[in-house]
Image: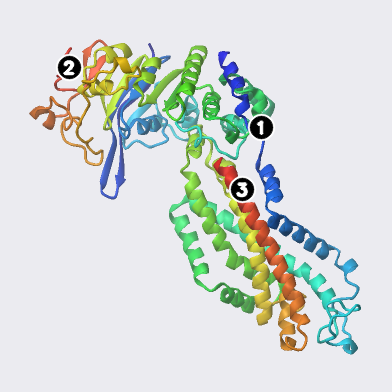
Amino acid sequence: MAELLRAERLVKEFPVKRGTVHAVSGVSFTIAKGETLGLVGESGCGKSTLGRLLLNLLEPTSGAVWFKGQDLSELKGREQRELRRGMQMIFQDPYASLDPRMSVGSLIMEPLNAHRVGNRREREEQVRGLMEQVGIRPEFFGRYPHQFSGGQRQRIGIARALALNPELVICDEPVSALDVSIQAQILNLLADLQKARGLTYLFISHDLNVVRYLSDRVMVMFLGQICELSPTEALYENPRHPYTKFLLEAVPQPDPTLRDAERVLLTGEVASPLNPPPGCRFHSRCPWADAICREKQPDLVEMAPGHLCACHHPMVDREIF
Amino acid sequence: MSNNKDARLFDAEIQPNDGPLASILHMFRVNHAALLGLILILLIILMAIFAPFIARYDPNQLNLIEMRKPPSPAHWFGTDDMGRDVFARVVYGSRTSLLIGFVPSLISLILGTVLGLLAGYVGGRVDDLIMRLADVVLAFPSLLLAMVVMYTLGSSILNMFIALSIINWAGTARVVRAQTLSIKETEFVEAARSMGVSRLSIVFKHILPNCLPNLIVLFTLDIPGAIMWESSMSFLGVGDPNAASWGLMVSQGKSYAYMCPWLILAPGIAILVTVMAFNFLGDGLRDAMDPYLKS
């Protein structure tokens, strides 16, 4: 498959009073056209920061983002804006990401206005078409966001992201603010739209079940670094990184009769991104950590075709205990 | 598409259409003080416009035979120390006082909004410069500052506008700057940036509209403020001596306060009613605008 986006050793550090927050530390990966790449990790591991770096909403401290074969940081002004049209974002909180003072129609029209697409009539036509596609009745053109439920608002957010016909959509936890019953509808809508428009998704979430449902490949992040990147089934069936293993162990089992009383959960504190430990960033919590883990950062290496893992002691069919 | 069905399913959840205008109308039905304020303001404006039809006398017509007469059927509010009809002067004075209320408030509203947006959105040195200037203005006692301006420029109604605008813009600029700073960081502004919306467009389509409720309230509270300042300055003798404002009437009547209380009571009550009417309306508008933002 053709490469659509490439991140090269992306680093983002935020200076704060007591030092530097290492939000993203040297992340490299590619997204192929048409695929869905899932991105999972716990709160504060740099998922959202990474998404914003790709869109250039945040300036990377170092590293580069290549989109459609062009280095985003080398383009200026209008050229960058033009290229960035192809990348849009769906935001986490449908209550905060829609301006309460704008009607639904003008919200969806905003990106079209910004890029001067067609004339006023054509834009309105297009907005009504988009509303229909995401399941909002076009009659609601003049309504305001507070008149809609969370799920409907997220549909509006999706329509805005699609207005400019992007190739890549970065979904930043698009369903985590919604009720479970609504989550499924939004996920199905995203899947339908992908099929209809040939979209590529980067799907950021902390919900492993949601990611498994949508993704072709999954990337696991811990403290600003990738620890595992693999085709979805391989990752869920045969995780190589201890952190992935523990994450999967922690997924809640909805059926109480299937619950395993002996479930092993992680202990210990997450190391702070303010002062990440030397060596493997996971070593302070990893039961198999030894001297090398405390000294040397593991490289991301291919363990099986397409299955990358950054660990000195990767798991090979190893039981936790 | 299958999702259309879902949308129909949720029709019941859609609330009736209530934009900002509807919530203001609703506020007037519930908040009677605000409604009273609105009615009084409309009456005062009508009084200012139709002054010649309401007052039977010329407000500047001297009549030394009828000096300092108490209220009577001929002179409803009595006459002043030069025999002028106090009722006519109060009616005509509404013109000056409303002008003094609206014009400087509008100037300081526009000035304060532009400077506040600049300071908040551009930040850095622009922010420092504008805010230090505002600090300087706010550090002076307002009345003193306005009087210095009037002494320097001379007593005229135009200079009164300038003086009142100078003391009022800083407060507006501070409020707008604070709002801009918080709105700038919201997710909907980030969303707009992610779509490639320009900075100018973000300021005018997102930040300014979200400041508007506060600006409307500030404006309705600035108007009585300006009327009060003008009254104080006229009372202290730095107003425009030719403009028959309510403040000037109180000032001129103060020597006869015990002998002829109607000379200060009539314009004093006019000031009180006008200021209260604007305050009631401003409070009501603030209440009407608040929940709309949250829901």
Residue sitting nearer the eye, A127 or A318: A318
Residue sitting nearer the eye, B161 or B254: B254
> Is any part of residue A68 visible from this angle?
no
* Location of residue B225 in the rendering, given as x and y in whole percent from the top left corner: 64, 67
Q: Which residue is mark 1?
A: A142
The amino acid type of the residue labelled 3 equals Met
The amino acid type of the residue labelled 2 equals Met
- Element at label 1: helix
Q: Which residue is mark 2?
A: A315
Q: Chain of mark 3?
A: B
Q: Residues within 10 Å of mark 1 (few under 14, many from 20)?
A: some
- Element at label 2: loop
User: Residue placed at 22% from the left, 21% from the top?
Assistant: A263
Mark 1 in CB contact with mark 2 (< 8 angstroms): no
* Location of residue A131 in the rendering, given as x and y in whole percent from the top left corner: 60, 23
Locate residue B95 relative to residue A145 in the image: left or right: right
Above/below status of B163 relative to B74: above
Q: Nearer the viewer, mark 3 or mark 1?
A: 3
Above/below status of A83 relative to A306: below
- Element at label 3: helix
Q: Chain of mark 2?
A: A
Cα distance between the residues tagged 1 and 2: 56 Å
Mark 2 in CB contact with mark 3 (< 8 angstroms): no
Cα distance between the residues tagged 2 and 3: 59 Å
User: Residue placed at 31% from the left, 15% from the top?
Assistant: A257
The amino acid type of the residue labelled 1 equals Gly
